[in-house]
Image (cartoon, rainbow, N blue to C red):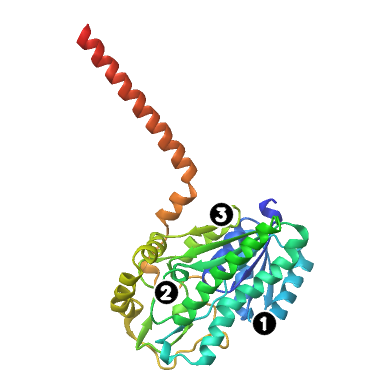
């Protein structure tokens, strides 16, 4: 499938990582179905894609509604043709200690962040399995493997995504299906979610440093959609979180208990009239980036190394062979010099 002929669907496409990913696919000339709840932001994203050289279709939909999401997939296929890549990205969260989160808030976070992925995967797979082709990308998180305090609902949902995706992957292998499913695990990203997520913290929420720009995530998602990788980790913090959870989870528990409360808050008090998007979208076009641009990295060395592993391996092999040849040459010279 050439870049210009790709049909892509992105949930949560109106802001943050979804918005940056939509632009990245737009630069490839793709046709993109944009799914989110706010039409104004989706129209702004559509304009960016068309300016970049792609095509876009706005479909207003709440991913928590499985029937409407399936209907959205049908609308995209009628407009653009068969869906090649489906990206589940929509999310919601609540910043608060667990005992300050209501059952309704926990349910809503789960419906969007976990069941939204389930519903999206159902809509995509229903069409892709019939054609025996296609890629589903789950936008995951380091928090899917190492939870942090103050986001129990979100962390639980991200863990659940990995669990159901692993189960589905085995089923696809059993069926000899050519549909591929991958997970892209992200570090802390500078998105508007910290400006509009519901919070009961005394100070303004922030991503746990180090922070990366959403374009870093978008590059990884586009790359992963065209590889046959099981999972793709982005950023050294993601690798560190997964490694620590494997070898020393108890130490991680205590470290996060001491540090993660302060690390998730700025020094600024929370505006008591701050709107949030948990139950309904916040008005205004927030774009892809949040307010932490001055602190955010524009590149991930870890991801660059992962993406270029084969080339780096080849270079390493050539350098190693050259070093061995040089050593042999030097030994021969020494022997010649010694015995005349």
Mark yes or no: residue 30 visible.
no
* Point 49% across, 50% down: residue: 307
Distance from disc 2 to disc 1, alpha carbons, whole Å, reads 27 Å
The relative height of residue 331 versus residue 171 in the rendered view (above or below) is above
Horizontal and vertical percent for residue 147? Answer: 42, 74
Residue 323 in picture, x, y percent from top left? 34, 29
Give the vertical position of 285 relative to 51 (above or below). below
User: Which mark's residue is nearer the viewer, 1 or 3?
Assistant: 3
Name the residue nearer the viewer: 286 or 7.
Answer: 7
Mark 2 or mark 3, earlier in chain: 2
Q: Residue at x 30, y 75 (%)?
A: 254
How crowded pointer 1 is (Cα within 10 Å; few <14, some 14-19, many 20+) is rated as some
Q: Nearer the viewer, residue 166 or 75?
A: 166
| Residue 269 location, quadrant | bottom left
Disc sitting over residue 229 in the figure: 3
Q: Is residue 3 left or right of residue 279?
A: right
Q: Please, is residue 161 above or below residue 273 in the view? A: above
Residue of label 2: 147
Looking at marks 1 and 3 on the same chain, the residue that comes earlier in the sequence is marked by 1
- Callout 1: SS: loop
Percent of width and height locating residue 222: 57, 58
Q: Quadrant of residue 60?
A: bottom right
Distance in Å between CA atoms under marks 1 and 3: 29 Å
Q: Nearer the viewer, residue 38 or 308?
A: 308
Q: CA distance from mark 2 to mark 3?
A: 24 Å
| In-front residue for pair 149/266 | 149
Label 3, residues with CA under 10 Å away: few <14, some 14-19, many ≥20: some
Residue in the picture at 50% in, 87% down:
276
Residue tagged 1: 65
The residue located at (42%, 34%) in the rendering is: 317
């Amino acid at each position: 499938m050439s870049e210009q002929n790709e049909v892509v669907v992105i949930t949560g496409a109106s802001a943050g990582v979804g918005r940056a990913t939509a632009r990245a696919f737009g630069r490839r000339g793709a046709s993109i179905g944009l799914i989110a709840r706010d039409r104004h932001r989706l129209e702004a994203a559509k304009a960016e894609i068309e300016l970049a050289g792609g095509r876009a279709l706005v479909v207003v939909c709440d991913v928590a509604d499985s029937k409407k999401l399936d209907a959205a997939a049908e609308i995209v296929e009628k407009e653009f043709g068969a869906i090649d890549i489906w990206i589940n990205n929509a999310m919601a969260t609540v910043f608060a200690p667990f005992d300050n989160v209501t059952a309704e808030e926990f349910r809503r976070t789960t419906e969007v962040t976990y069941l939204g992925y389930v519903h999206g995967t159902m809509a995509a797979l229903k069409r892709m399995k019939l054609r025996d082709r296609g890629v589903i990308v789950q936008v995951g998180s380091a928090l899917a493997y190492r939870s942090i305090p103050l986001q129990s609902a979100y962390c639980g949902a991200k863990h659940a995504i990995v669990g159901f995706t692993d189960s589905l992957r085995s089923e696809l292998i059993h069926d000899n299906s050519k549909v591929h499913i991958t997970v892209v695990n992200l570090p802390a990203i500078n998105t508007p979610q910290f400006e509009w997520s519901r919070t009961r913290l005394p100070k303004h929420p922030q991503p746990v440093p180090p922070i990366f720009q959403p374009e870093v995530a978008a590059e990884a998602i586009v790359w992963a959609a065209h590889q046959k990788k099981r999972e793709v980790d982005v950023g050294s913090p993601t690798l560190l979180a997964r490694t620590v959870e494997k070898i020393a989870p108890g130490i991680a528990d205590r470290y996060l208990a001491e540090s993660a409360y302060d690390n998730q808050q700025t020094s600024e008090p929370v505006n008591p009239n701050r709107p949030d998007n948990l139950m309904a979208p916040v008005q205004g076009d927030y774009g892809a980036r949040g307010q932490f641009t001055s602190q955010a990295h524009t590149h991930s060395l870890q991801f660059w190394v992962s993406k270029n592993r084969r080339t780096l391996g080849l270079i390493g092999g050539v350098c190693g062979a050259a070093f061995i040849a040089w050593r042999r040459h030097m030994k021969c010279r020494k022997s010649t010099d010694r015995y005349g």
